[in-house]
Image (cartoon, rainbow, N blue to C red):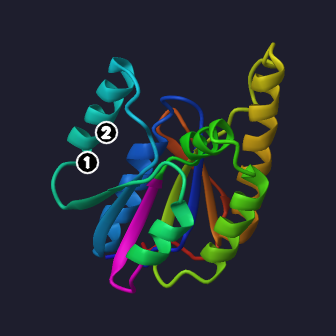
Amino acid sequence: MSVLQTTLVLGGARSGKSSFAESLIAASGLARIYVATAAAGDDEMRARIAHHRDRRGAGWTTREVELDLVEVLARDSDVDVAVLVDCLTLWLSNLMHAGRDAAREGTRLADWLRNATCPVVLVSNEVGLGLVPETPLGRSFRDAQGRLNQTIAAAVPEVAFVAAGLPLWLKRSSIPPA
């Protein structure tokens, strides 16, 4: 059993970030809560959700939340649990689609994380490493995602970037056990 710190896990699409985040939670030995932010709006997304659920297996309590993430975290956090939020990118998309103030919501989340009573592992996409989106909405989303990632990274003690299934620690507050 390792000591789990609140951690932001960044990476590109299909980089292995969710599997890595799940492994951090599993190694903690704590009860596991999975906070899913995806909306199953079409067959492809339903298949992705099913894949994640099947890969996780049993032993997780799942909460589905599209918008009110801080409220769900506040309600379900406890010193005896570890929470996985997968993912901030879909949460941001949901917020923007609903016309919510994404910057304000990100700040609320960061403030809550600074005082969390349990470890939280948050998964988020790094979307600023590729091509410049050709639409104003795409550019706005990319910029908002970058700002959200910075806000959360500043609030948590640990940040990892995952590429090809391999983590690169960008910020580390603890020394991993031998």
> Residue at horizontal 58%, vertical 76%?
174
Q: Which residue is mark 1?
A: 56
- In the image, residue 135 lies at what x, y percent? 80, 16
Give the quarter of the image for residue 113.
Answer: bottom right
> Residue at horizontal 51%, vertical 47%?
87
Identify the residue at the far left of this view.
58
Q: Quadrant of the N terminus?
A: bottom left
Sort mark 1 into few (<14), some (14-19) or many (20+) by Cα contacts within 10 Å: some
Start-end of magenta stretch: 77-85
Q: Secondary structure at mark 1?
A: helix
Q: Is residue 36 visible?
A: yes
> Residue at horizontal 26%, vertical 34%?
50
Frontmost residue, 5 versus 92: 92
- In the image, residue 19 lies at what x, y percent? 38, 45
- In the image, residue 128 lies at what x, y percent? 76, 32
Q: Is residue 48 above or below residue 57?
A: above
> Residue at horizontal 53%, vertical 60%?
69
